[in-house]
Amino acid sequence: MSSHSATPQPLIARRGASLAGRLRVPGDKSISHRSLIFGLLSAGETAISGLLEGEDVLRTADAARALGADVERLGEGRWRVRGVGIGGLSRPAGVLDFGNAGTGSRLMMGVVGGHPITATFDGDASLRKRPMRRILDPLVKMGARVVSEAEGGRCPITLEGARETVPIVYETPVASAQIKSAVLLAGLNAPGRTTVVENEASRDHTERMLRHFGAEVSVEPHGIHGRRITVVGHPELTARPVVVPADPSSAAFPLVAALIVPGSDIVLEGVMMNPLRTGLVTTLMEMGADIAVLDRREEGGEDVADLRVRAGTLKGIDVPAERAPSMIDEYPILAVAAAFAEGETVMRGLHELRVKESDRLEAVLAGLRAAGVDAEIAGDDLIVRGGRVPGGGTAATHLDHRIAMSFLVLGLASEKPMQVDDGTMIATSFPTFVPLMHGLGANIG
């Protein structure tokens, strides 16, 4: 639950004119968290531009300060971090409160776990429900100690970092960039080589940023879909500027809106095109979406491009389970696109959606049904039969920002307006969503 407002604020989206214009959505959340963390662990001054200033990222900035970095906001999206270097962290005076930030808290556990300091991690009601055992287990193998934890390995957790960090070879139980990153970050303060083995490749932002800041990282294939990632401990990380690319998960909302609102034509600027994050664009193109990829370039170790998106006719397809890791956050908005597509769309292997901020799979199904869309869940598959979208209902968001934005997008093209029960938590990932959509001509309020 977002801490700034206990009063729900319902929002309604209505059908209106076509969407037009250019926009840059806020910076990528994954890169924003990591730029602050690497700034903390580097010697010198890291200049960051395009930082996502949502609540989650600001909690990571606070934590970096508490661990000894000098963190300063210079202007919109422009930040400066004077780091303490690996091994230079100080023990925080108070509790590290991460609010709703699962990524920030888990990555910072890796940082603390590899340093001889003790810190207590906590967050809001939603974060306190999320399991942390998968992160703590490898850190304990590296020499950290869990002093106290809530039932089932949940926050609040007091973690005593390793006096002498032990390098390990760790095979992750599930494809998770958070587990992998926590181990690699702890390994920075270990002698020798720390290796993470993944049977299914997860997002590789940490490896890319480690290289960008001067660490020695090797990535080798492992099995058919997996990777073996090794970092050499005690590197001298040197401050480097970071340009945060536009978040593909946030870009997904105006992108799908432009596909389903007749006559729309928009350009999304500087969107991250990391192949492990472009599952949604690939899927929409398979459905017949008119998306042109323009001006590919590299920023901050990541591939980016501008996307020109035009409305058109979509058709239902079968989305394979192995695509899930590259678009796990985009299924709610894909389900909205599927509602407007001709025929049936089957999204397979969505088990991971049941353990997000809410049971996102059930929430998506309930929202589609509230909009009069024919949909069902079979096992871990979501089946949507598209075509007519009556709208006219209210989607329950369960305090989930992606559910809220997805059903507001649906309301821009459904026959009757669509309401969401609460829009306050949109601020955690995309604080400027409503004004940016207004700028394209959307009717949300």
Image: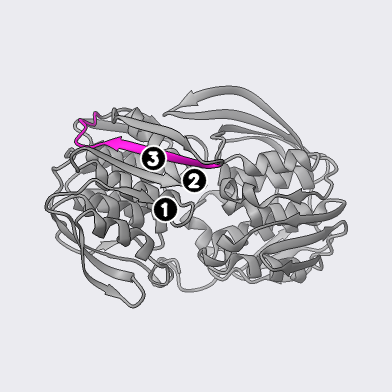
Q: CA distance from mark 3 to mark 2?
A: 10 Å
User: Mark 2: which amino acid?
Assistant: Ser
Q: Name the side, left or right, on which 85 lies relative to 107.
A: left
- Pointer 2 residue: 202
* Residue 292 x/y as whole percent: 71, 29
Nearer the observer, 53 or 137: 137
Q: Which residues are magenta?
A: 225-238
| Residue 244, quarter of picture | top left
Q: Residue at x 35, y 29 (%)?
A: 211
* Residue 31 x/y as whole percent: 42, 41
- Pointer 3 residue: 206
- Pointer 1 residue: 172
Q: Name the side, left or right, on which 292 lies relative to 93.
A: right
User: Mark 3: which amino acid?
Assistant: Thr
- Which structural element holds mark 3? helix
Q: CA distance from mark 1 to mark 3?
A: 15 Å
The mark closer to the camera, 1 or 3, is 1
